[in-house]
């Protein structure tokens, strides 16, 4: 770490709570100094000394096209010319909703907000208003942002198992139960006797916040069936998965239609825009049609809406992008598997589209949060540091995954594989 960075971290800690705006960035998950980034382009992040790193954090998901795709960052004055925020409804916002609905028909009606946190918070409120019930069932290790109802035992880098210490009110805790992912028996046990209180089940249909976790056969179908049987709603949180797994999202892949959906991250091309939506009768609970409220100064602002159109334009103009990213991710995953075979390491490498992940834990890939917590944190910390030394920026937490973008190249992937080799060779304890 340069003295440059040390002094920046000191300055950060003197004015920002914990030195950062999101705890994962502090490096606490890997016992490392905070990575201070000075700039970015394409697939690369740069520190204050100007050193370049291949970036696999990709802002925790939004950067499907890397940091600076020209179609997203050029001619921004065209978007700004008419102002950033209007506080009125406008045709481009309507057109954006129409475009989204052609890809996600389950979002019959939607509303734009700025972040995934807001999208989930709003969807839960609507579900409770529509059902006139309070209980929410969520899953440990799924992350849905930092609102009260979503935070307990969240994945990602939220260490929030102690509700009181996390500032989650007792009253809220009475209305949230946290089940085990991929475990319908845990769902039934928690709901037993409370079925008629259930407003919604919220789930990441494919999870990116406790490492990469796929639903086992029958799990999501079981949730769909239980929500229906208990008169509750099923909410798919696709804040990570929408556009990452193509414009039809995870819901098309798993073949299940949720009652409500939340989206965000990639859709703004780096600008903050998200949405929640679902069945028309459910969304009619919102004012002015119904009696519950969500709103916001920045909801549907023309700048972010314009960015979202650019993202969809880019995806529609380049369907080959998905194949290219998948090929790169496969190359990375295959390369890591080969290295692990060579060193006789028992770690499962998973890859799905442009996501690549492995954990320092022997056995099958993560199936739930217990698996995620059982991974060896110290090994990951050593690996993170060794990779950083070699110019590779990994997420500073083992709950996250590696994101490949359209900006990554085969050379970047090969450099990454060489860095993994080098890191394993250097740190003998990583090979044990
Ligand atoms: C699945 C999921 N939902 C919701 C959120 C919250 O989104 P935001 O950080 O935009 O508030 C995240 C963020 O990581 C997420 O991964």
Image (tube, rainbow, N blue to C red):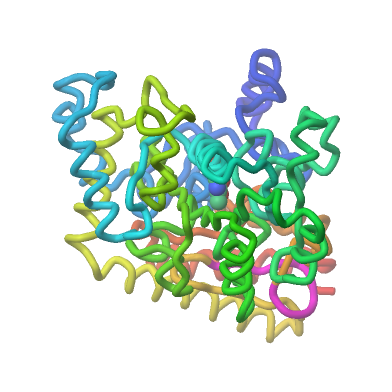
Residue range in magenta is 356-365
Q: Is residue 311 left or right of residue 221?
A: left
Say which residue appears at 71% left-offset and 47% top-offset: 154
Q: Is residue 97 above or below residue 18?
A: below
**Residue 150 location, quadrant:** top right
Q: Residue placed farthest to the top in the image?
A: 15
**Residue 169 location, quadrant:** top right
Q: Is residue 250 above or below residue 120?
A: below
Q: Is residue 341 above or below residue 138?
A: below
Say which residue appears at 61% left-offset and 79% top-offset: 218
Q: Is residue 377 left or right of residue 351?
A: right
Give the tally of numbered discs.
0
Q: Nearer the viewer, residue 365 or 149?
A: 149
- Whole-percent x and y of residue 140? 74, 55
Check residue 2 for magenta coloring: no
- Whole-percent x and y of residue 122? 51, 36
Say which residue appears at 44% left-offset and 74% top-offset: 255
- Quadrant location of the N terminus? top right
Say which residue appears at 76% left-offset and 67% top-offset: 360
């Amino acid at each position: 770490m340069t003295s440059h960075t040390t002094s920046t971290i000191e300055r950060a800690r003197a004015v920002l709570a914990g030195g950062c705006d999101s705890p994962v960035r502090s490096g606490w998950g890997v016992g490392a100094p905070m990575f201070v980034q000075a700039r970015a382009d394409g697939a690369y992040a740069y520190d204050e000394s100007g050193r370049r790193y291949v970036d696999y954090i990709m802002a925790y998901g939004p950067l499907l096209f890397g940091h600076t795709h020209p179609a997203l960052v050029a001619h921004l004055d065209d978007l700004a010319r008419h102002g950033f925020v209007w506080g009125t409804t406008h045709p481009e916002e309507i057109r954006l909703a129409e475009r989204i609905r052609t890809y996600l028909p389950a979002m019959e009606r939607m509303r734009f907000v700025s972040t995934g946190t807001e999208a989930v918070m709003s969807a839960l409120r609507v579900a409770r208003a529509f059902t006139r019930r309070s209980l929410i069932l969520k899953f440990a290790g799924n992350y849905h942002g930092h609102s009260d109802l979503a935070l307990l035992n969240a994945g990602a880098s939220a260490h929030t198992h102690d509700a009181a210490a996390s500032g989650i009110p007792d009253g809220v805790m009475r209305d949230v139960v946290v089940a085990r992912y991929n475990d319908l028996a845990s769902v039934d046990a928690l709901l037993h006797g409370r079925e008629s209180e259930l407003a919604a089940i919220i789930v990441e249909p494919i999870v990116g916040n406790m490492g990469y976790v796929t639903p086992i056969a029958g799990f999501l179908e079981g949730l769909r069936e239980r929500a229906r049987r208990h008169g509750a709603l099923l909410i798919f949180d696709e804040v990570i998965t929408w556009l990452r797994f193509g414009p039809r999202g995870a819901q098309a892949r798993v073949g299940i239609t949720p009652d409500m959906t939340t989206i965000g991250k990639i859709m703004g091309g780096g600008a903050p825009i998200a949405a929640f939506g679902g069945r028309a009768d459910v969304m009619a609970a919102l004012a002015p049609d119904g009696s519950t409220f969500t709103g916001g100064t920045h909801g549907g602002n023309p700048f972010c809406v314009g960015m979202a159109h650019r993202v969809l334009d880019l995806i529609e103009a380049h369907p080959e992008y998905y194949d290219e990213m998948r090929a790169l991710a496969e190359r990375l995953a295959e390369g890591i598997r080969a290295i692990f075979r060579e060193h006789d390491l028992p770690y499962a490498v998973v890859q799905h589209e442009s996501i690549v992940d492995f954990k320092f834990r022997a056995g099958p890939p993560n199936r739930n949060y217990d698996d995620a917590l059982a991974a060896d944190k110290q090994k990951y910390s050593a690996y993170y540091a060794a990779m950083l030394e070699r110019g590779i920026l990994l997420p500073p937490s083992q709950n996250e995954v590696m994101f490949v973008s359209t900006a990554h190249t085969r050379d970047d992937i090969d450099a990454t594989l060489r860095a993994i080799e080098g890191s394993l060779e250097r740190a003998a304890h990583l090979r044990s």
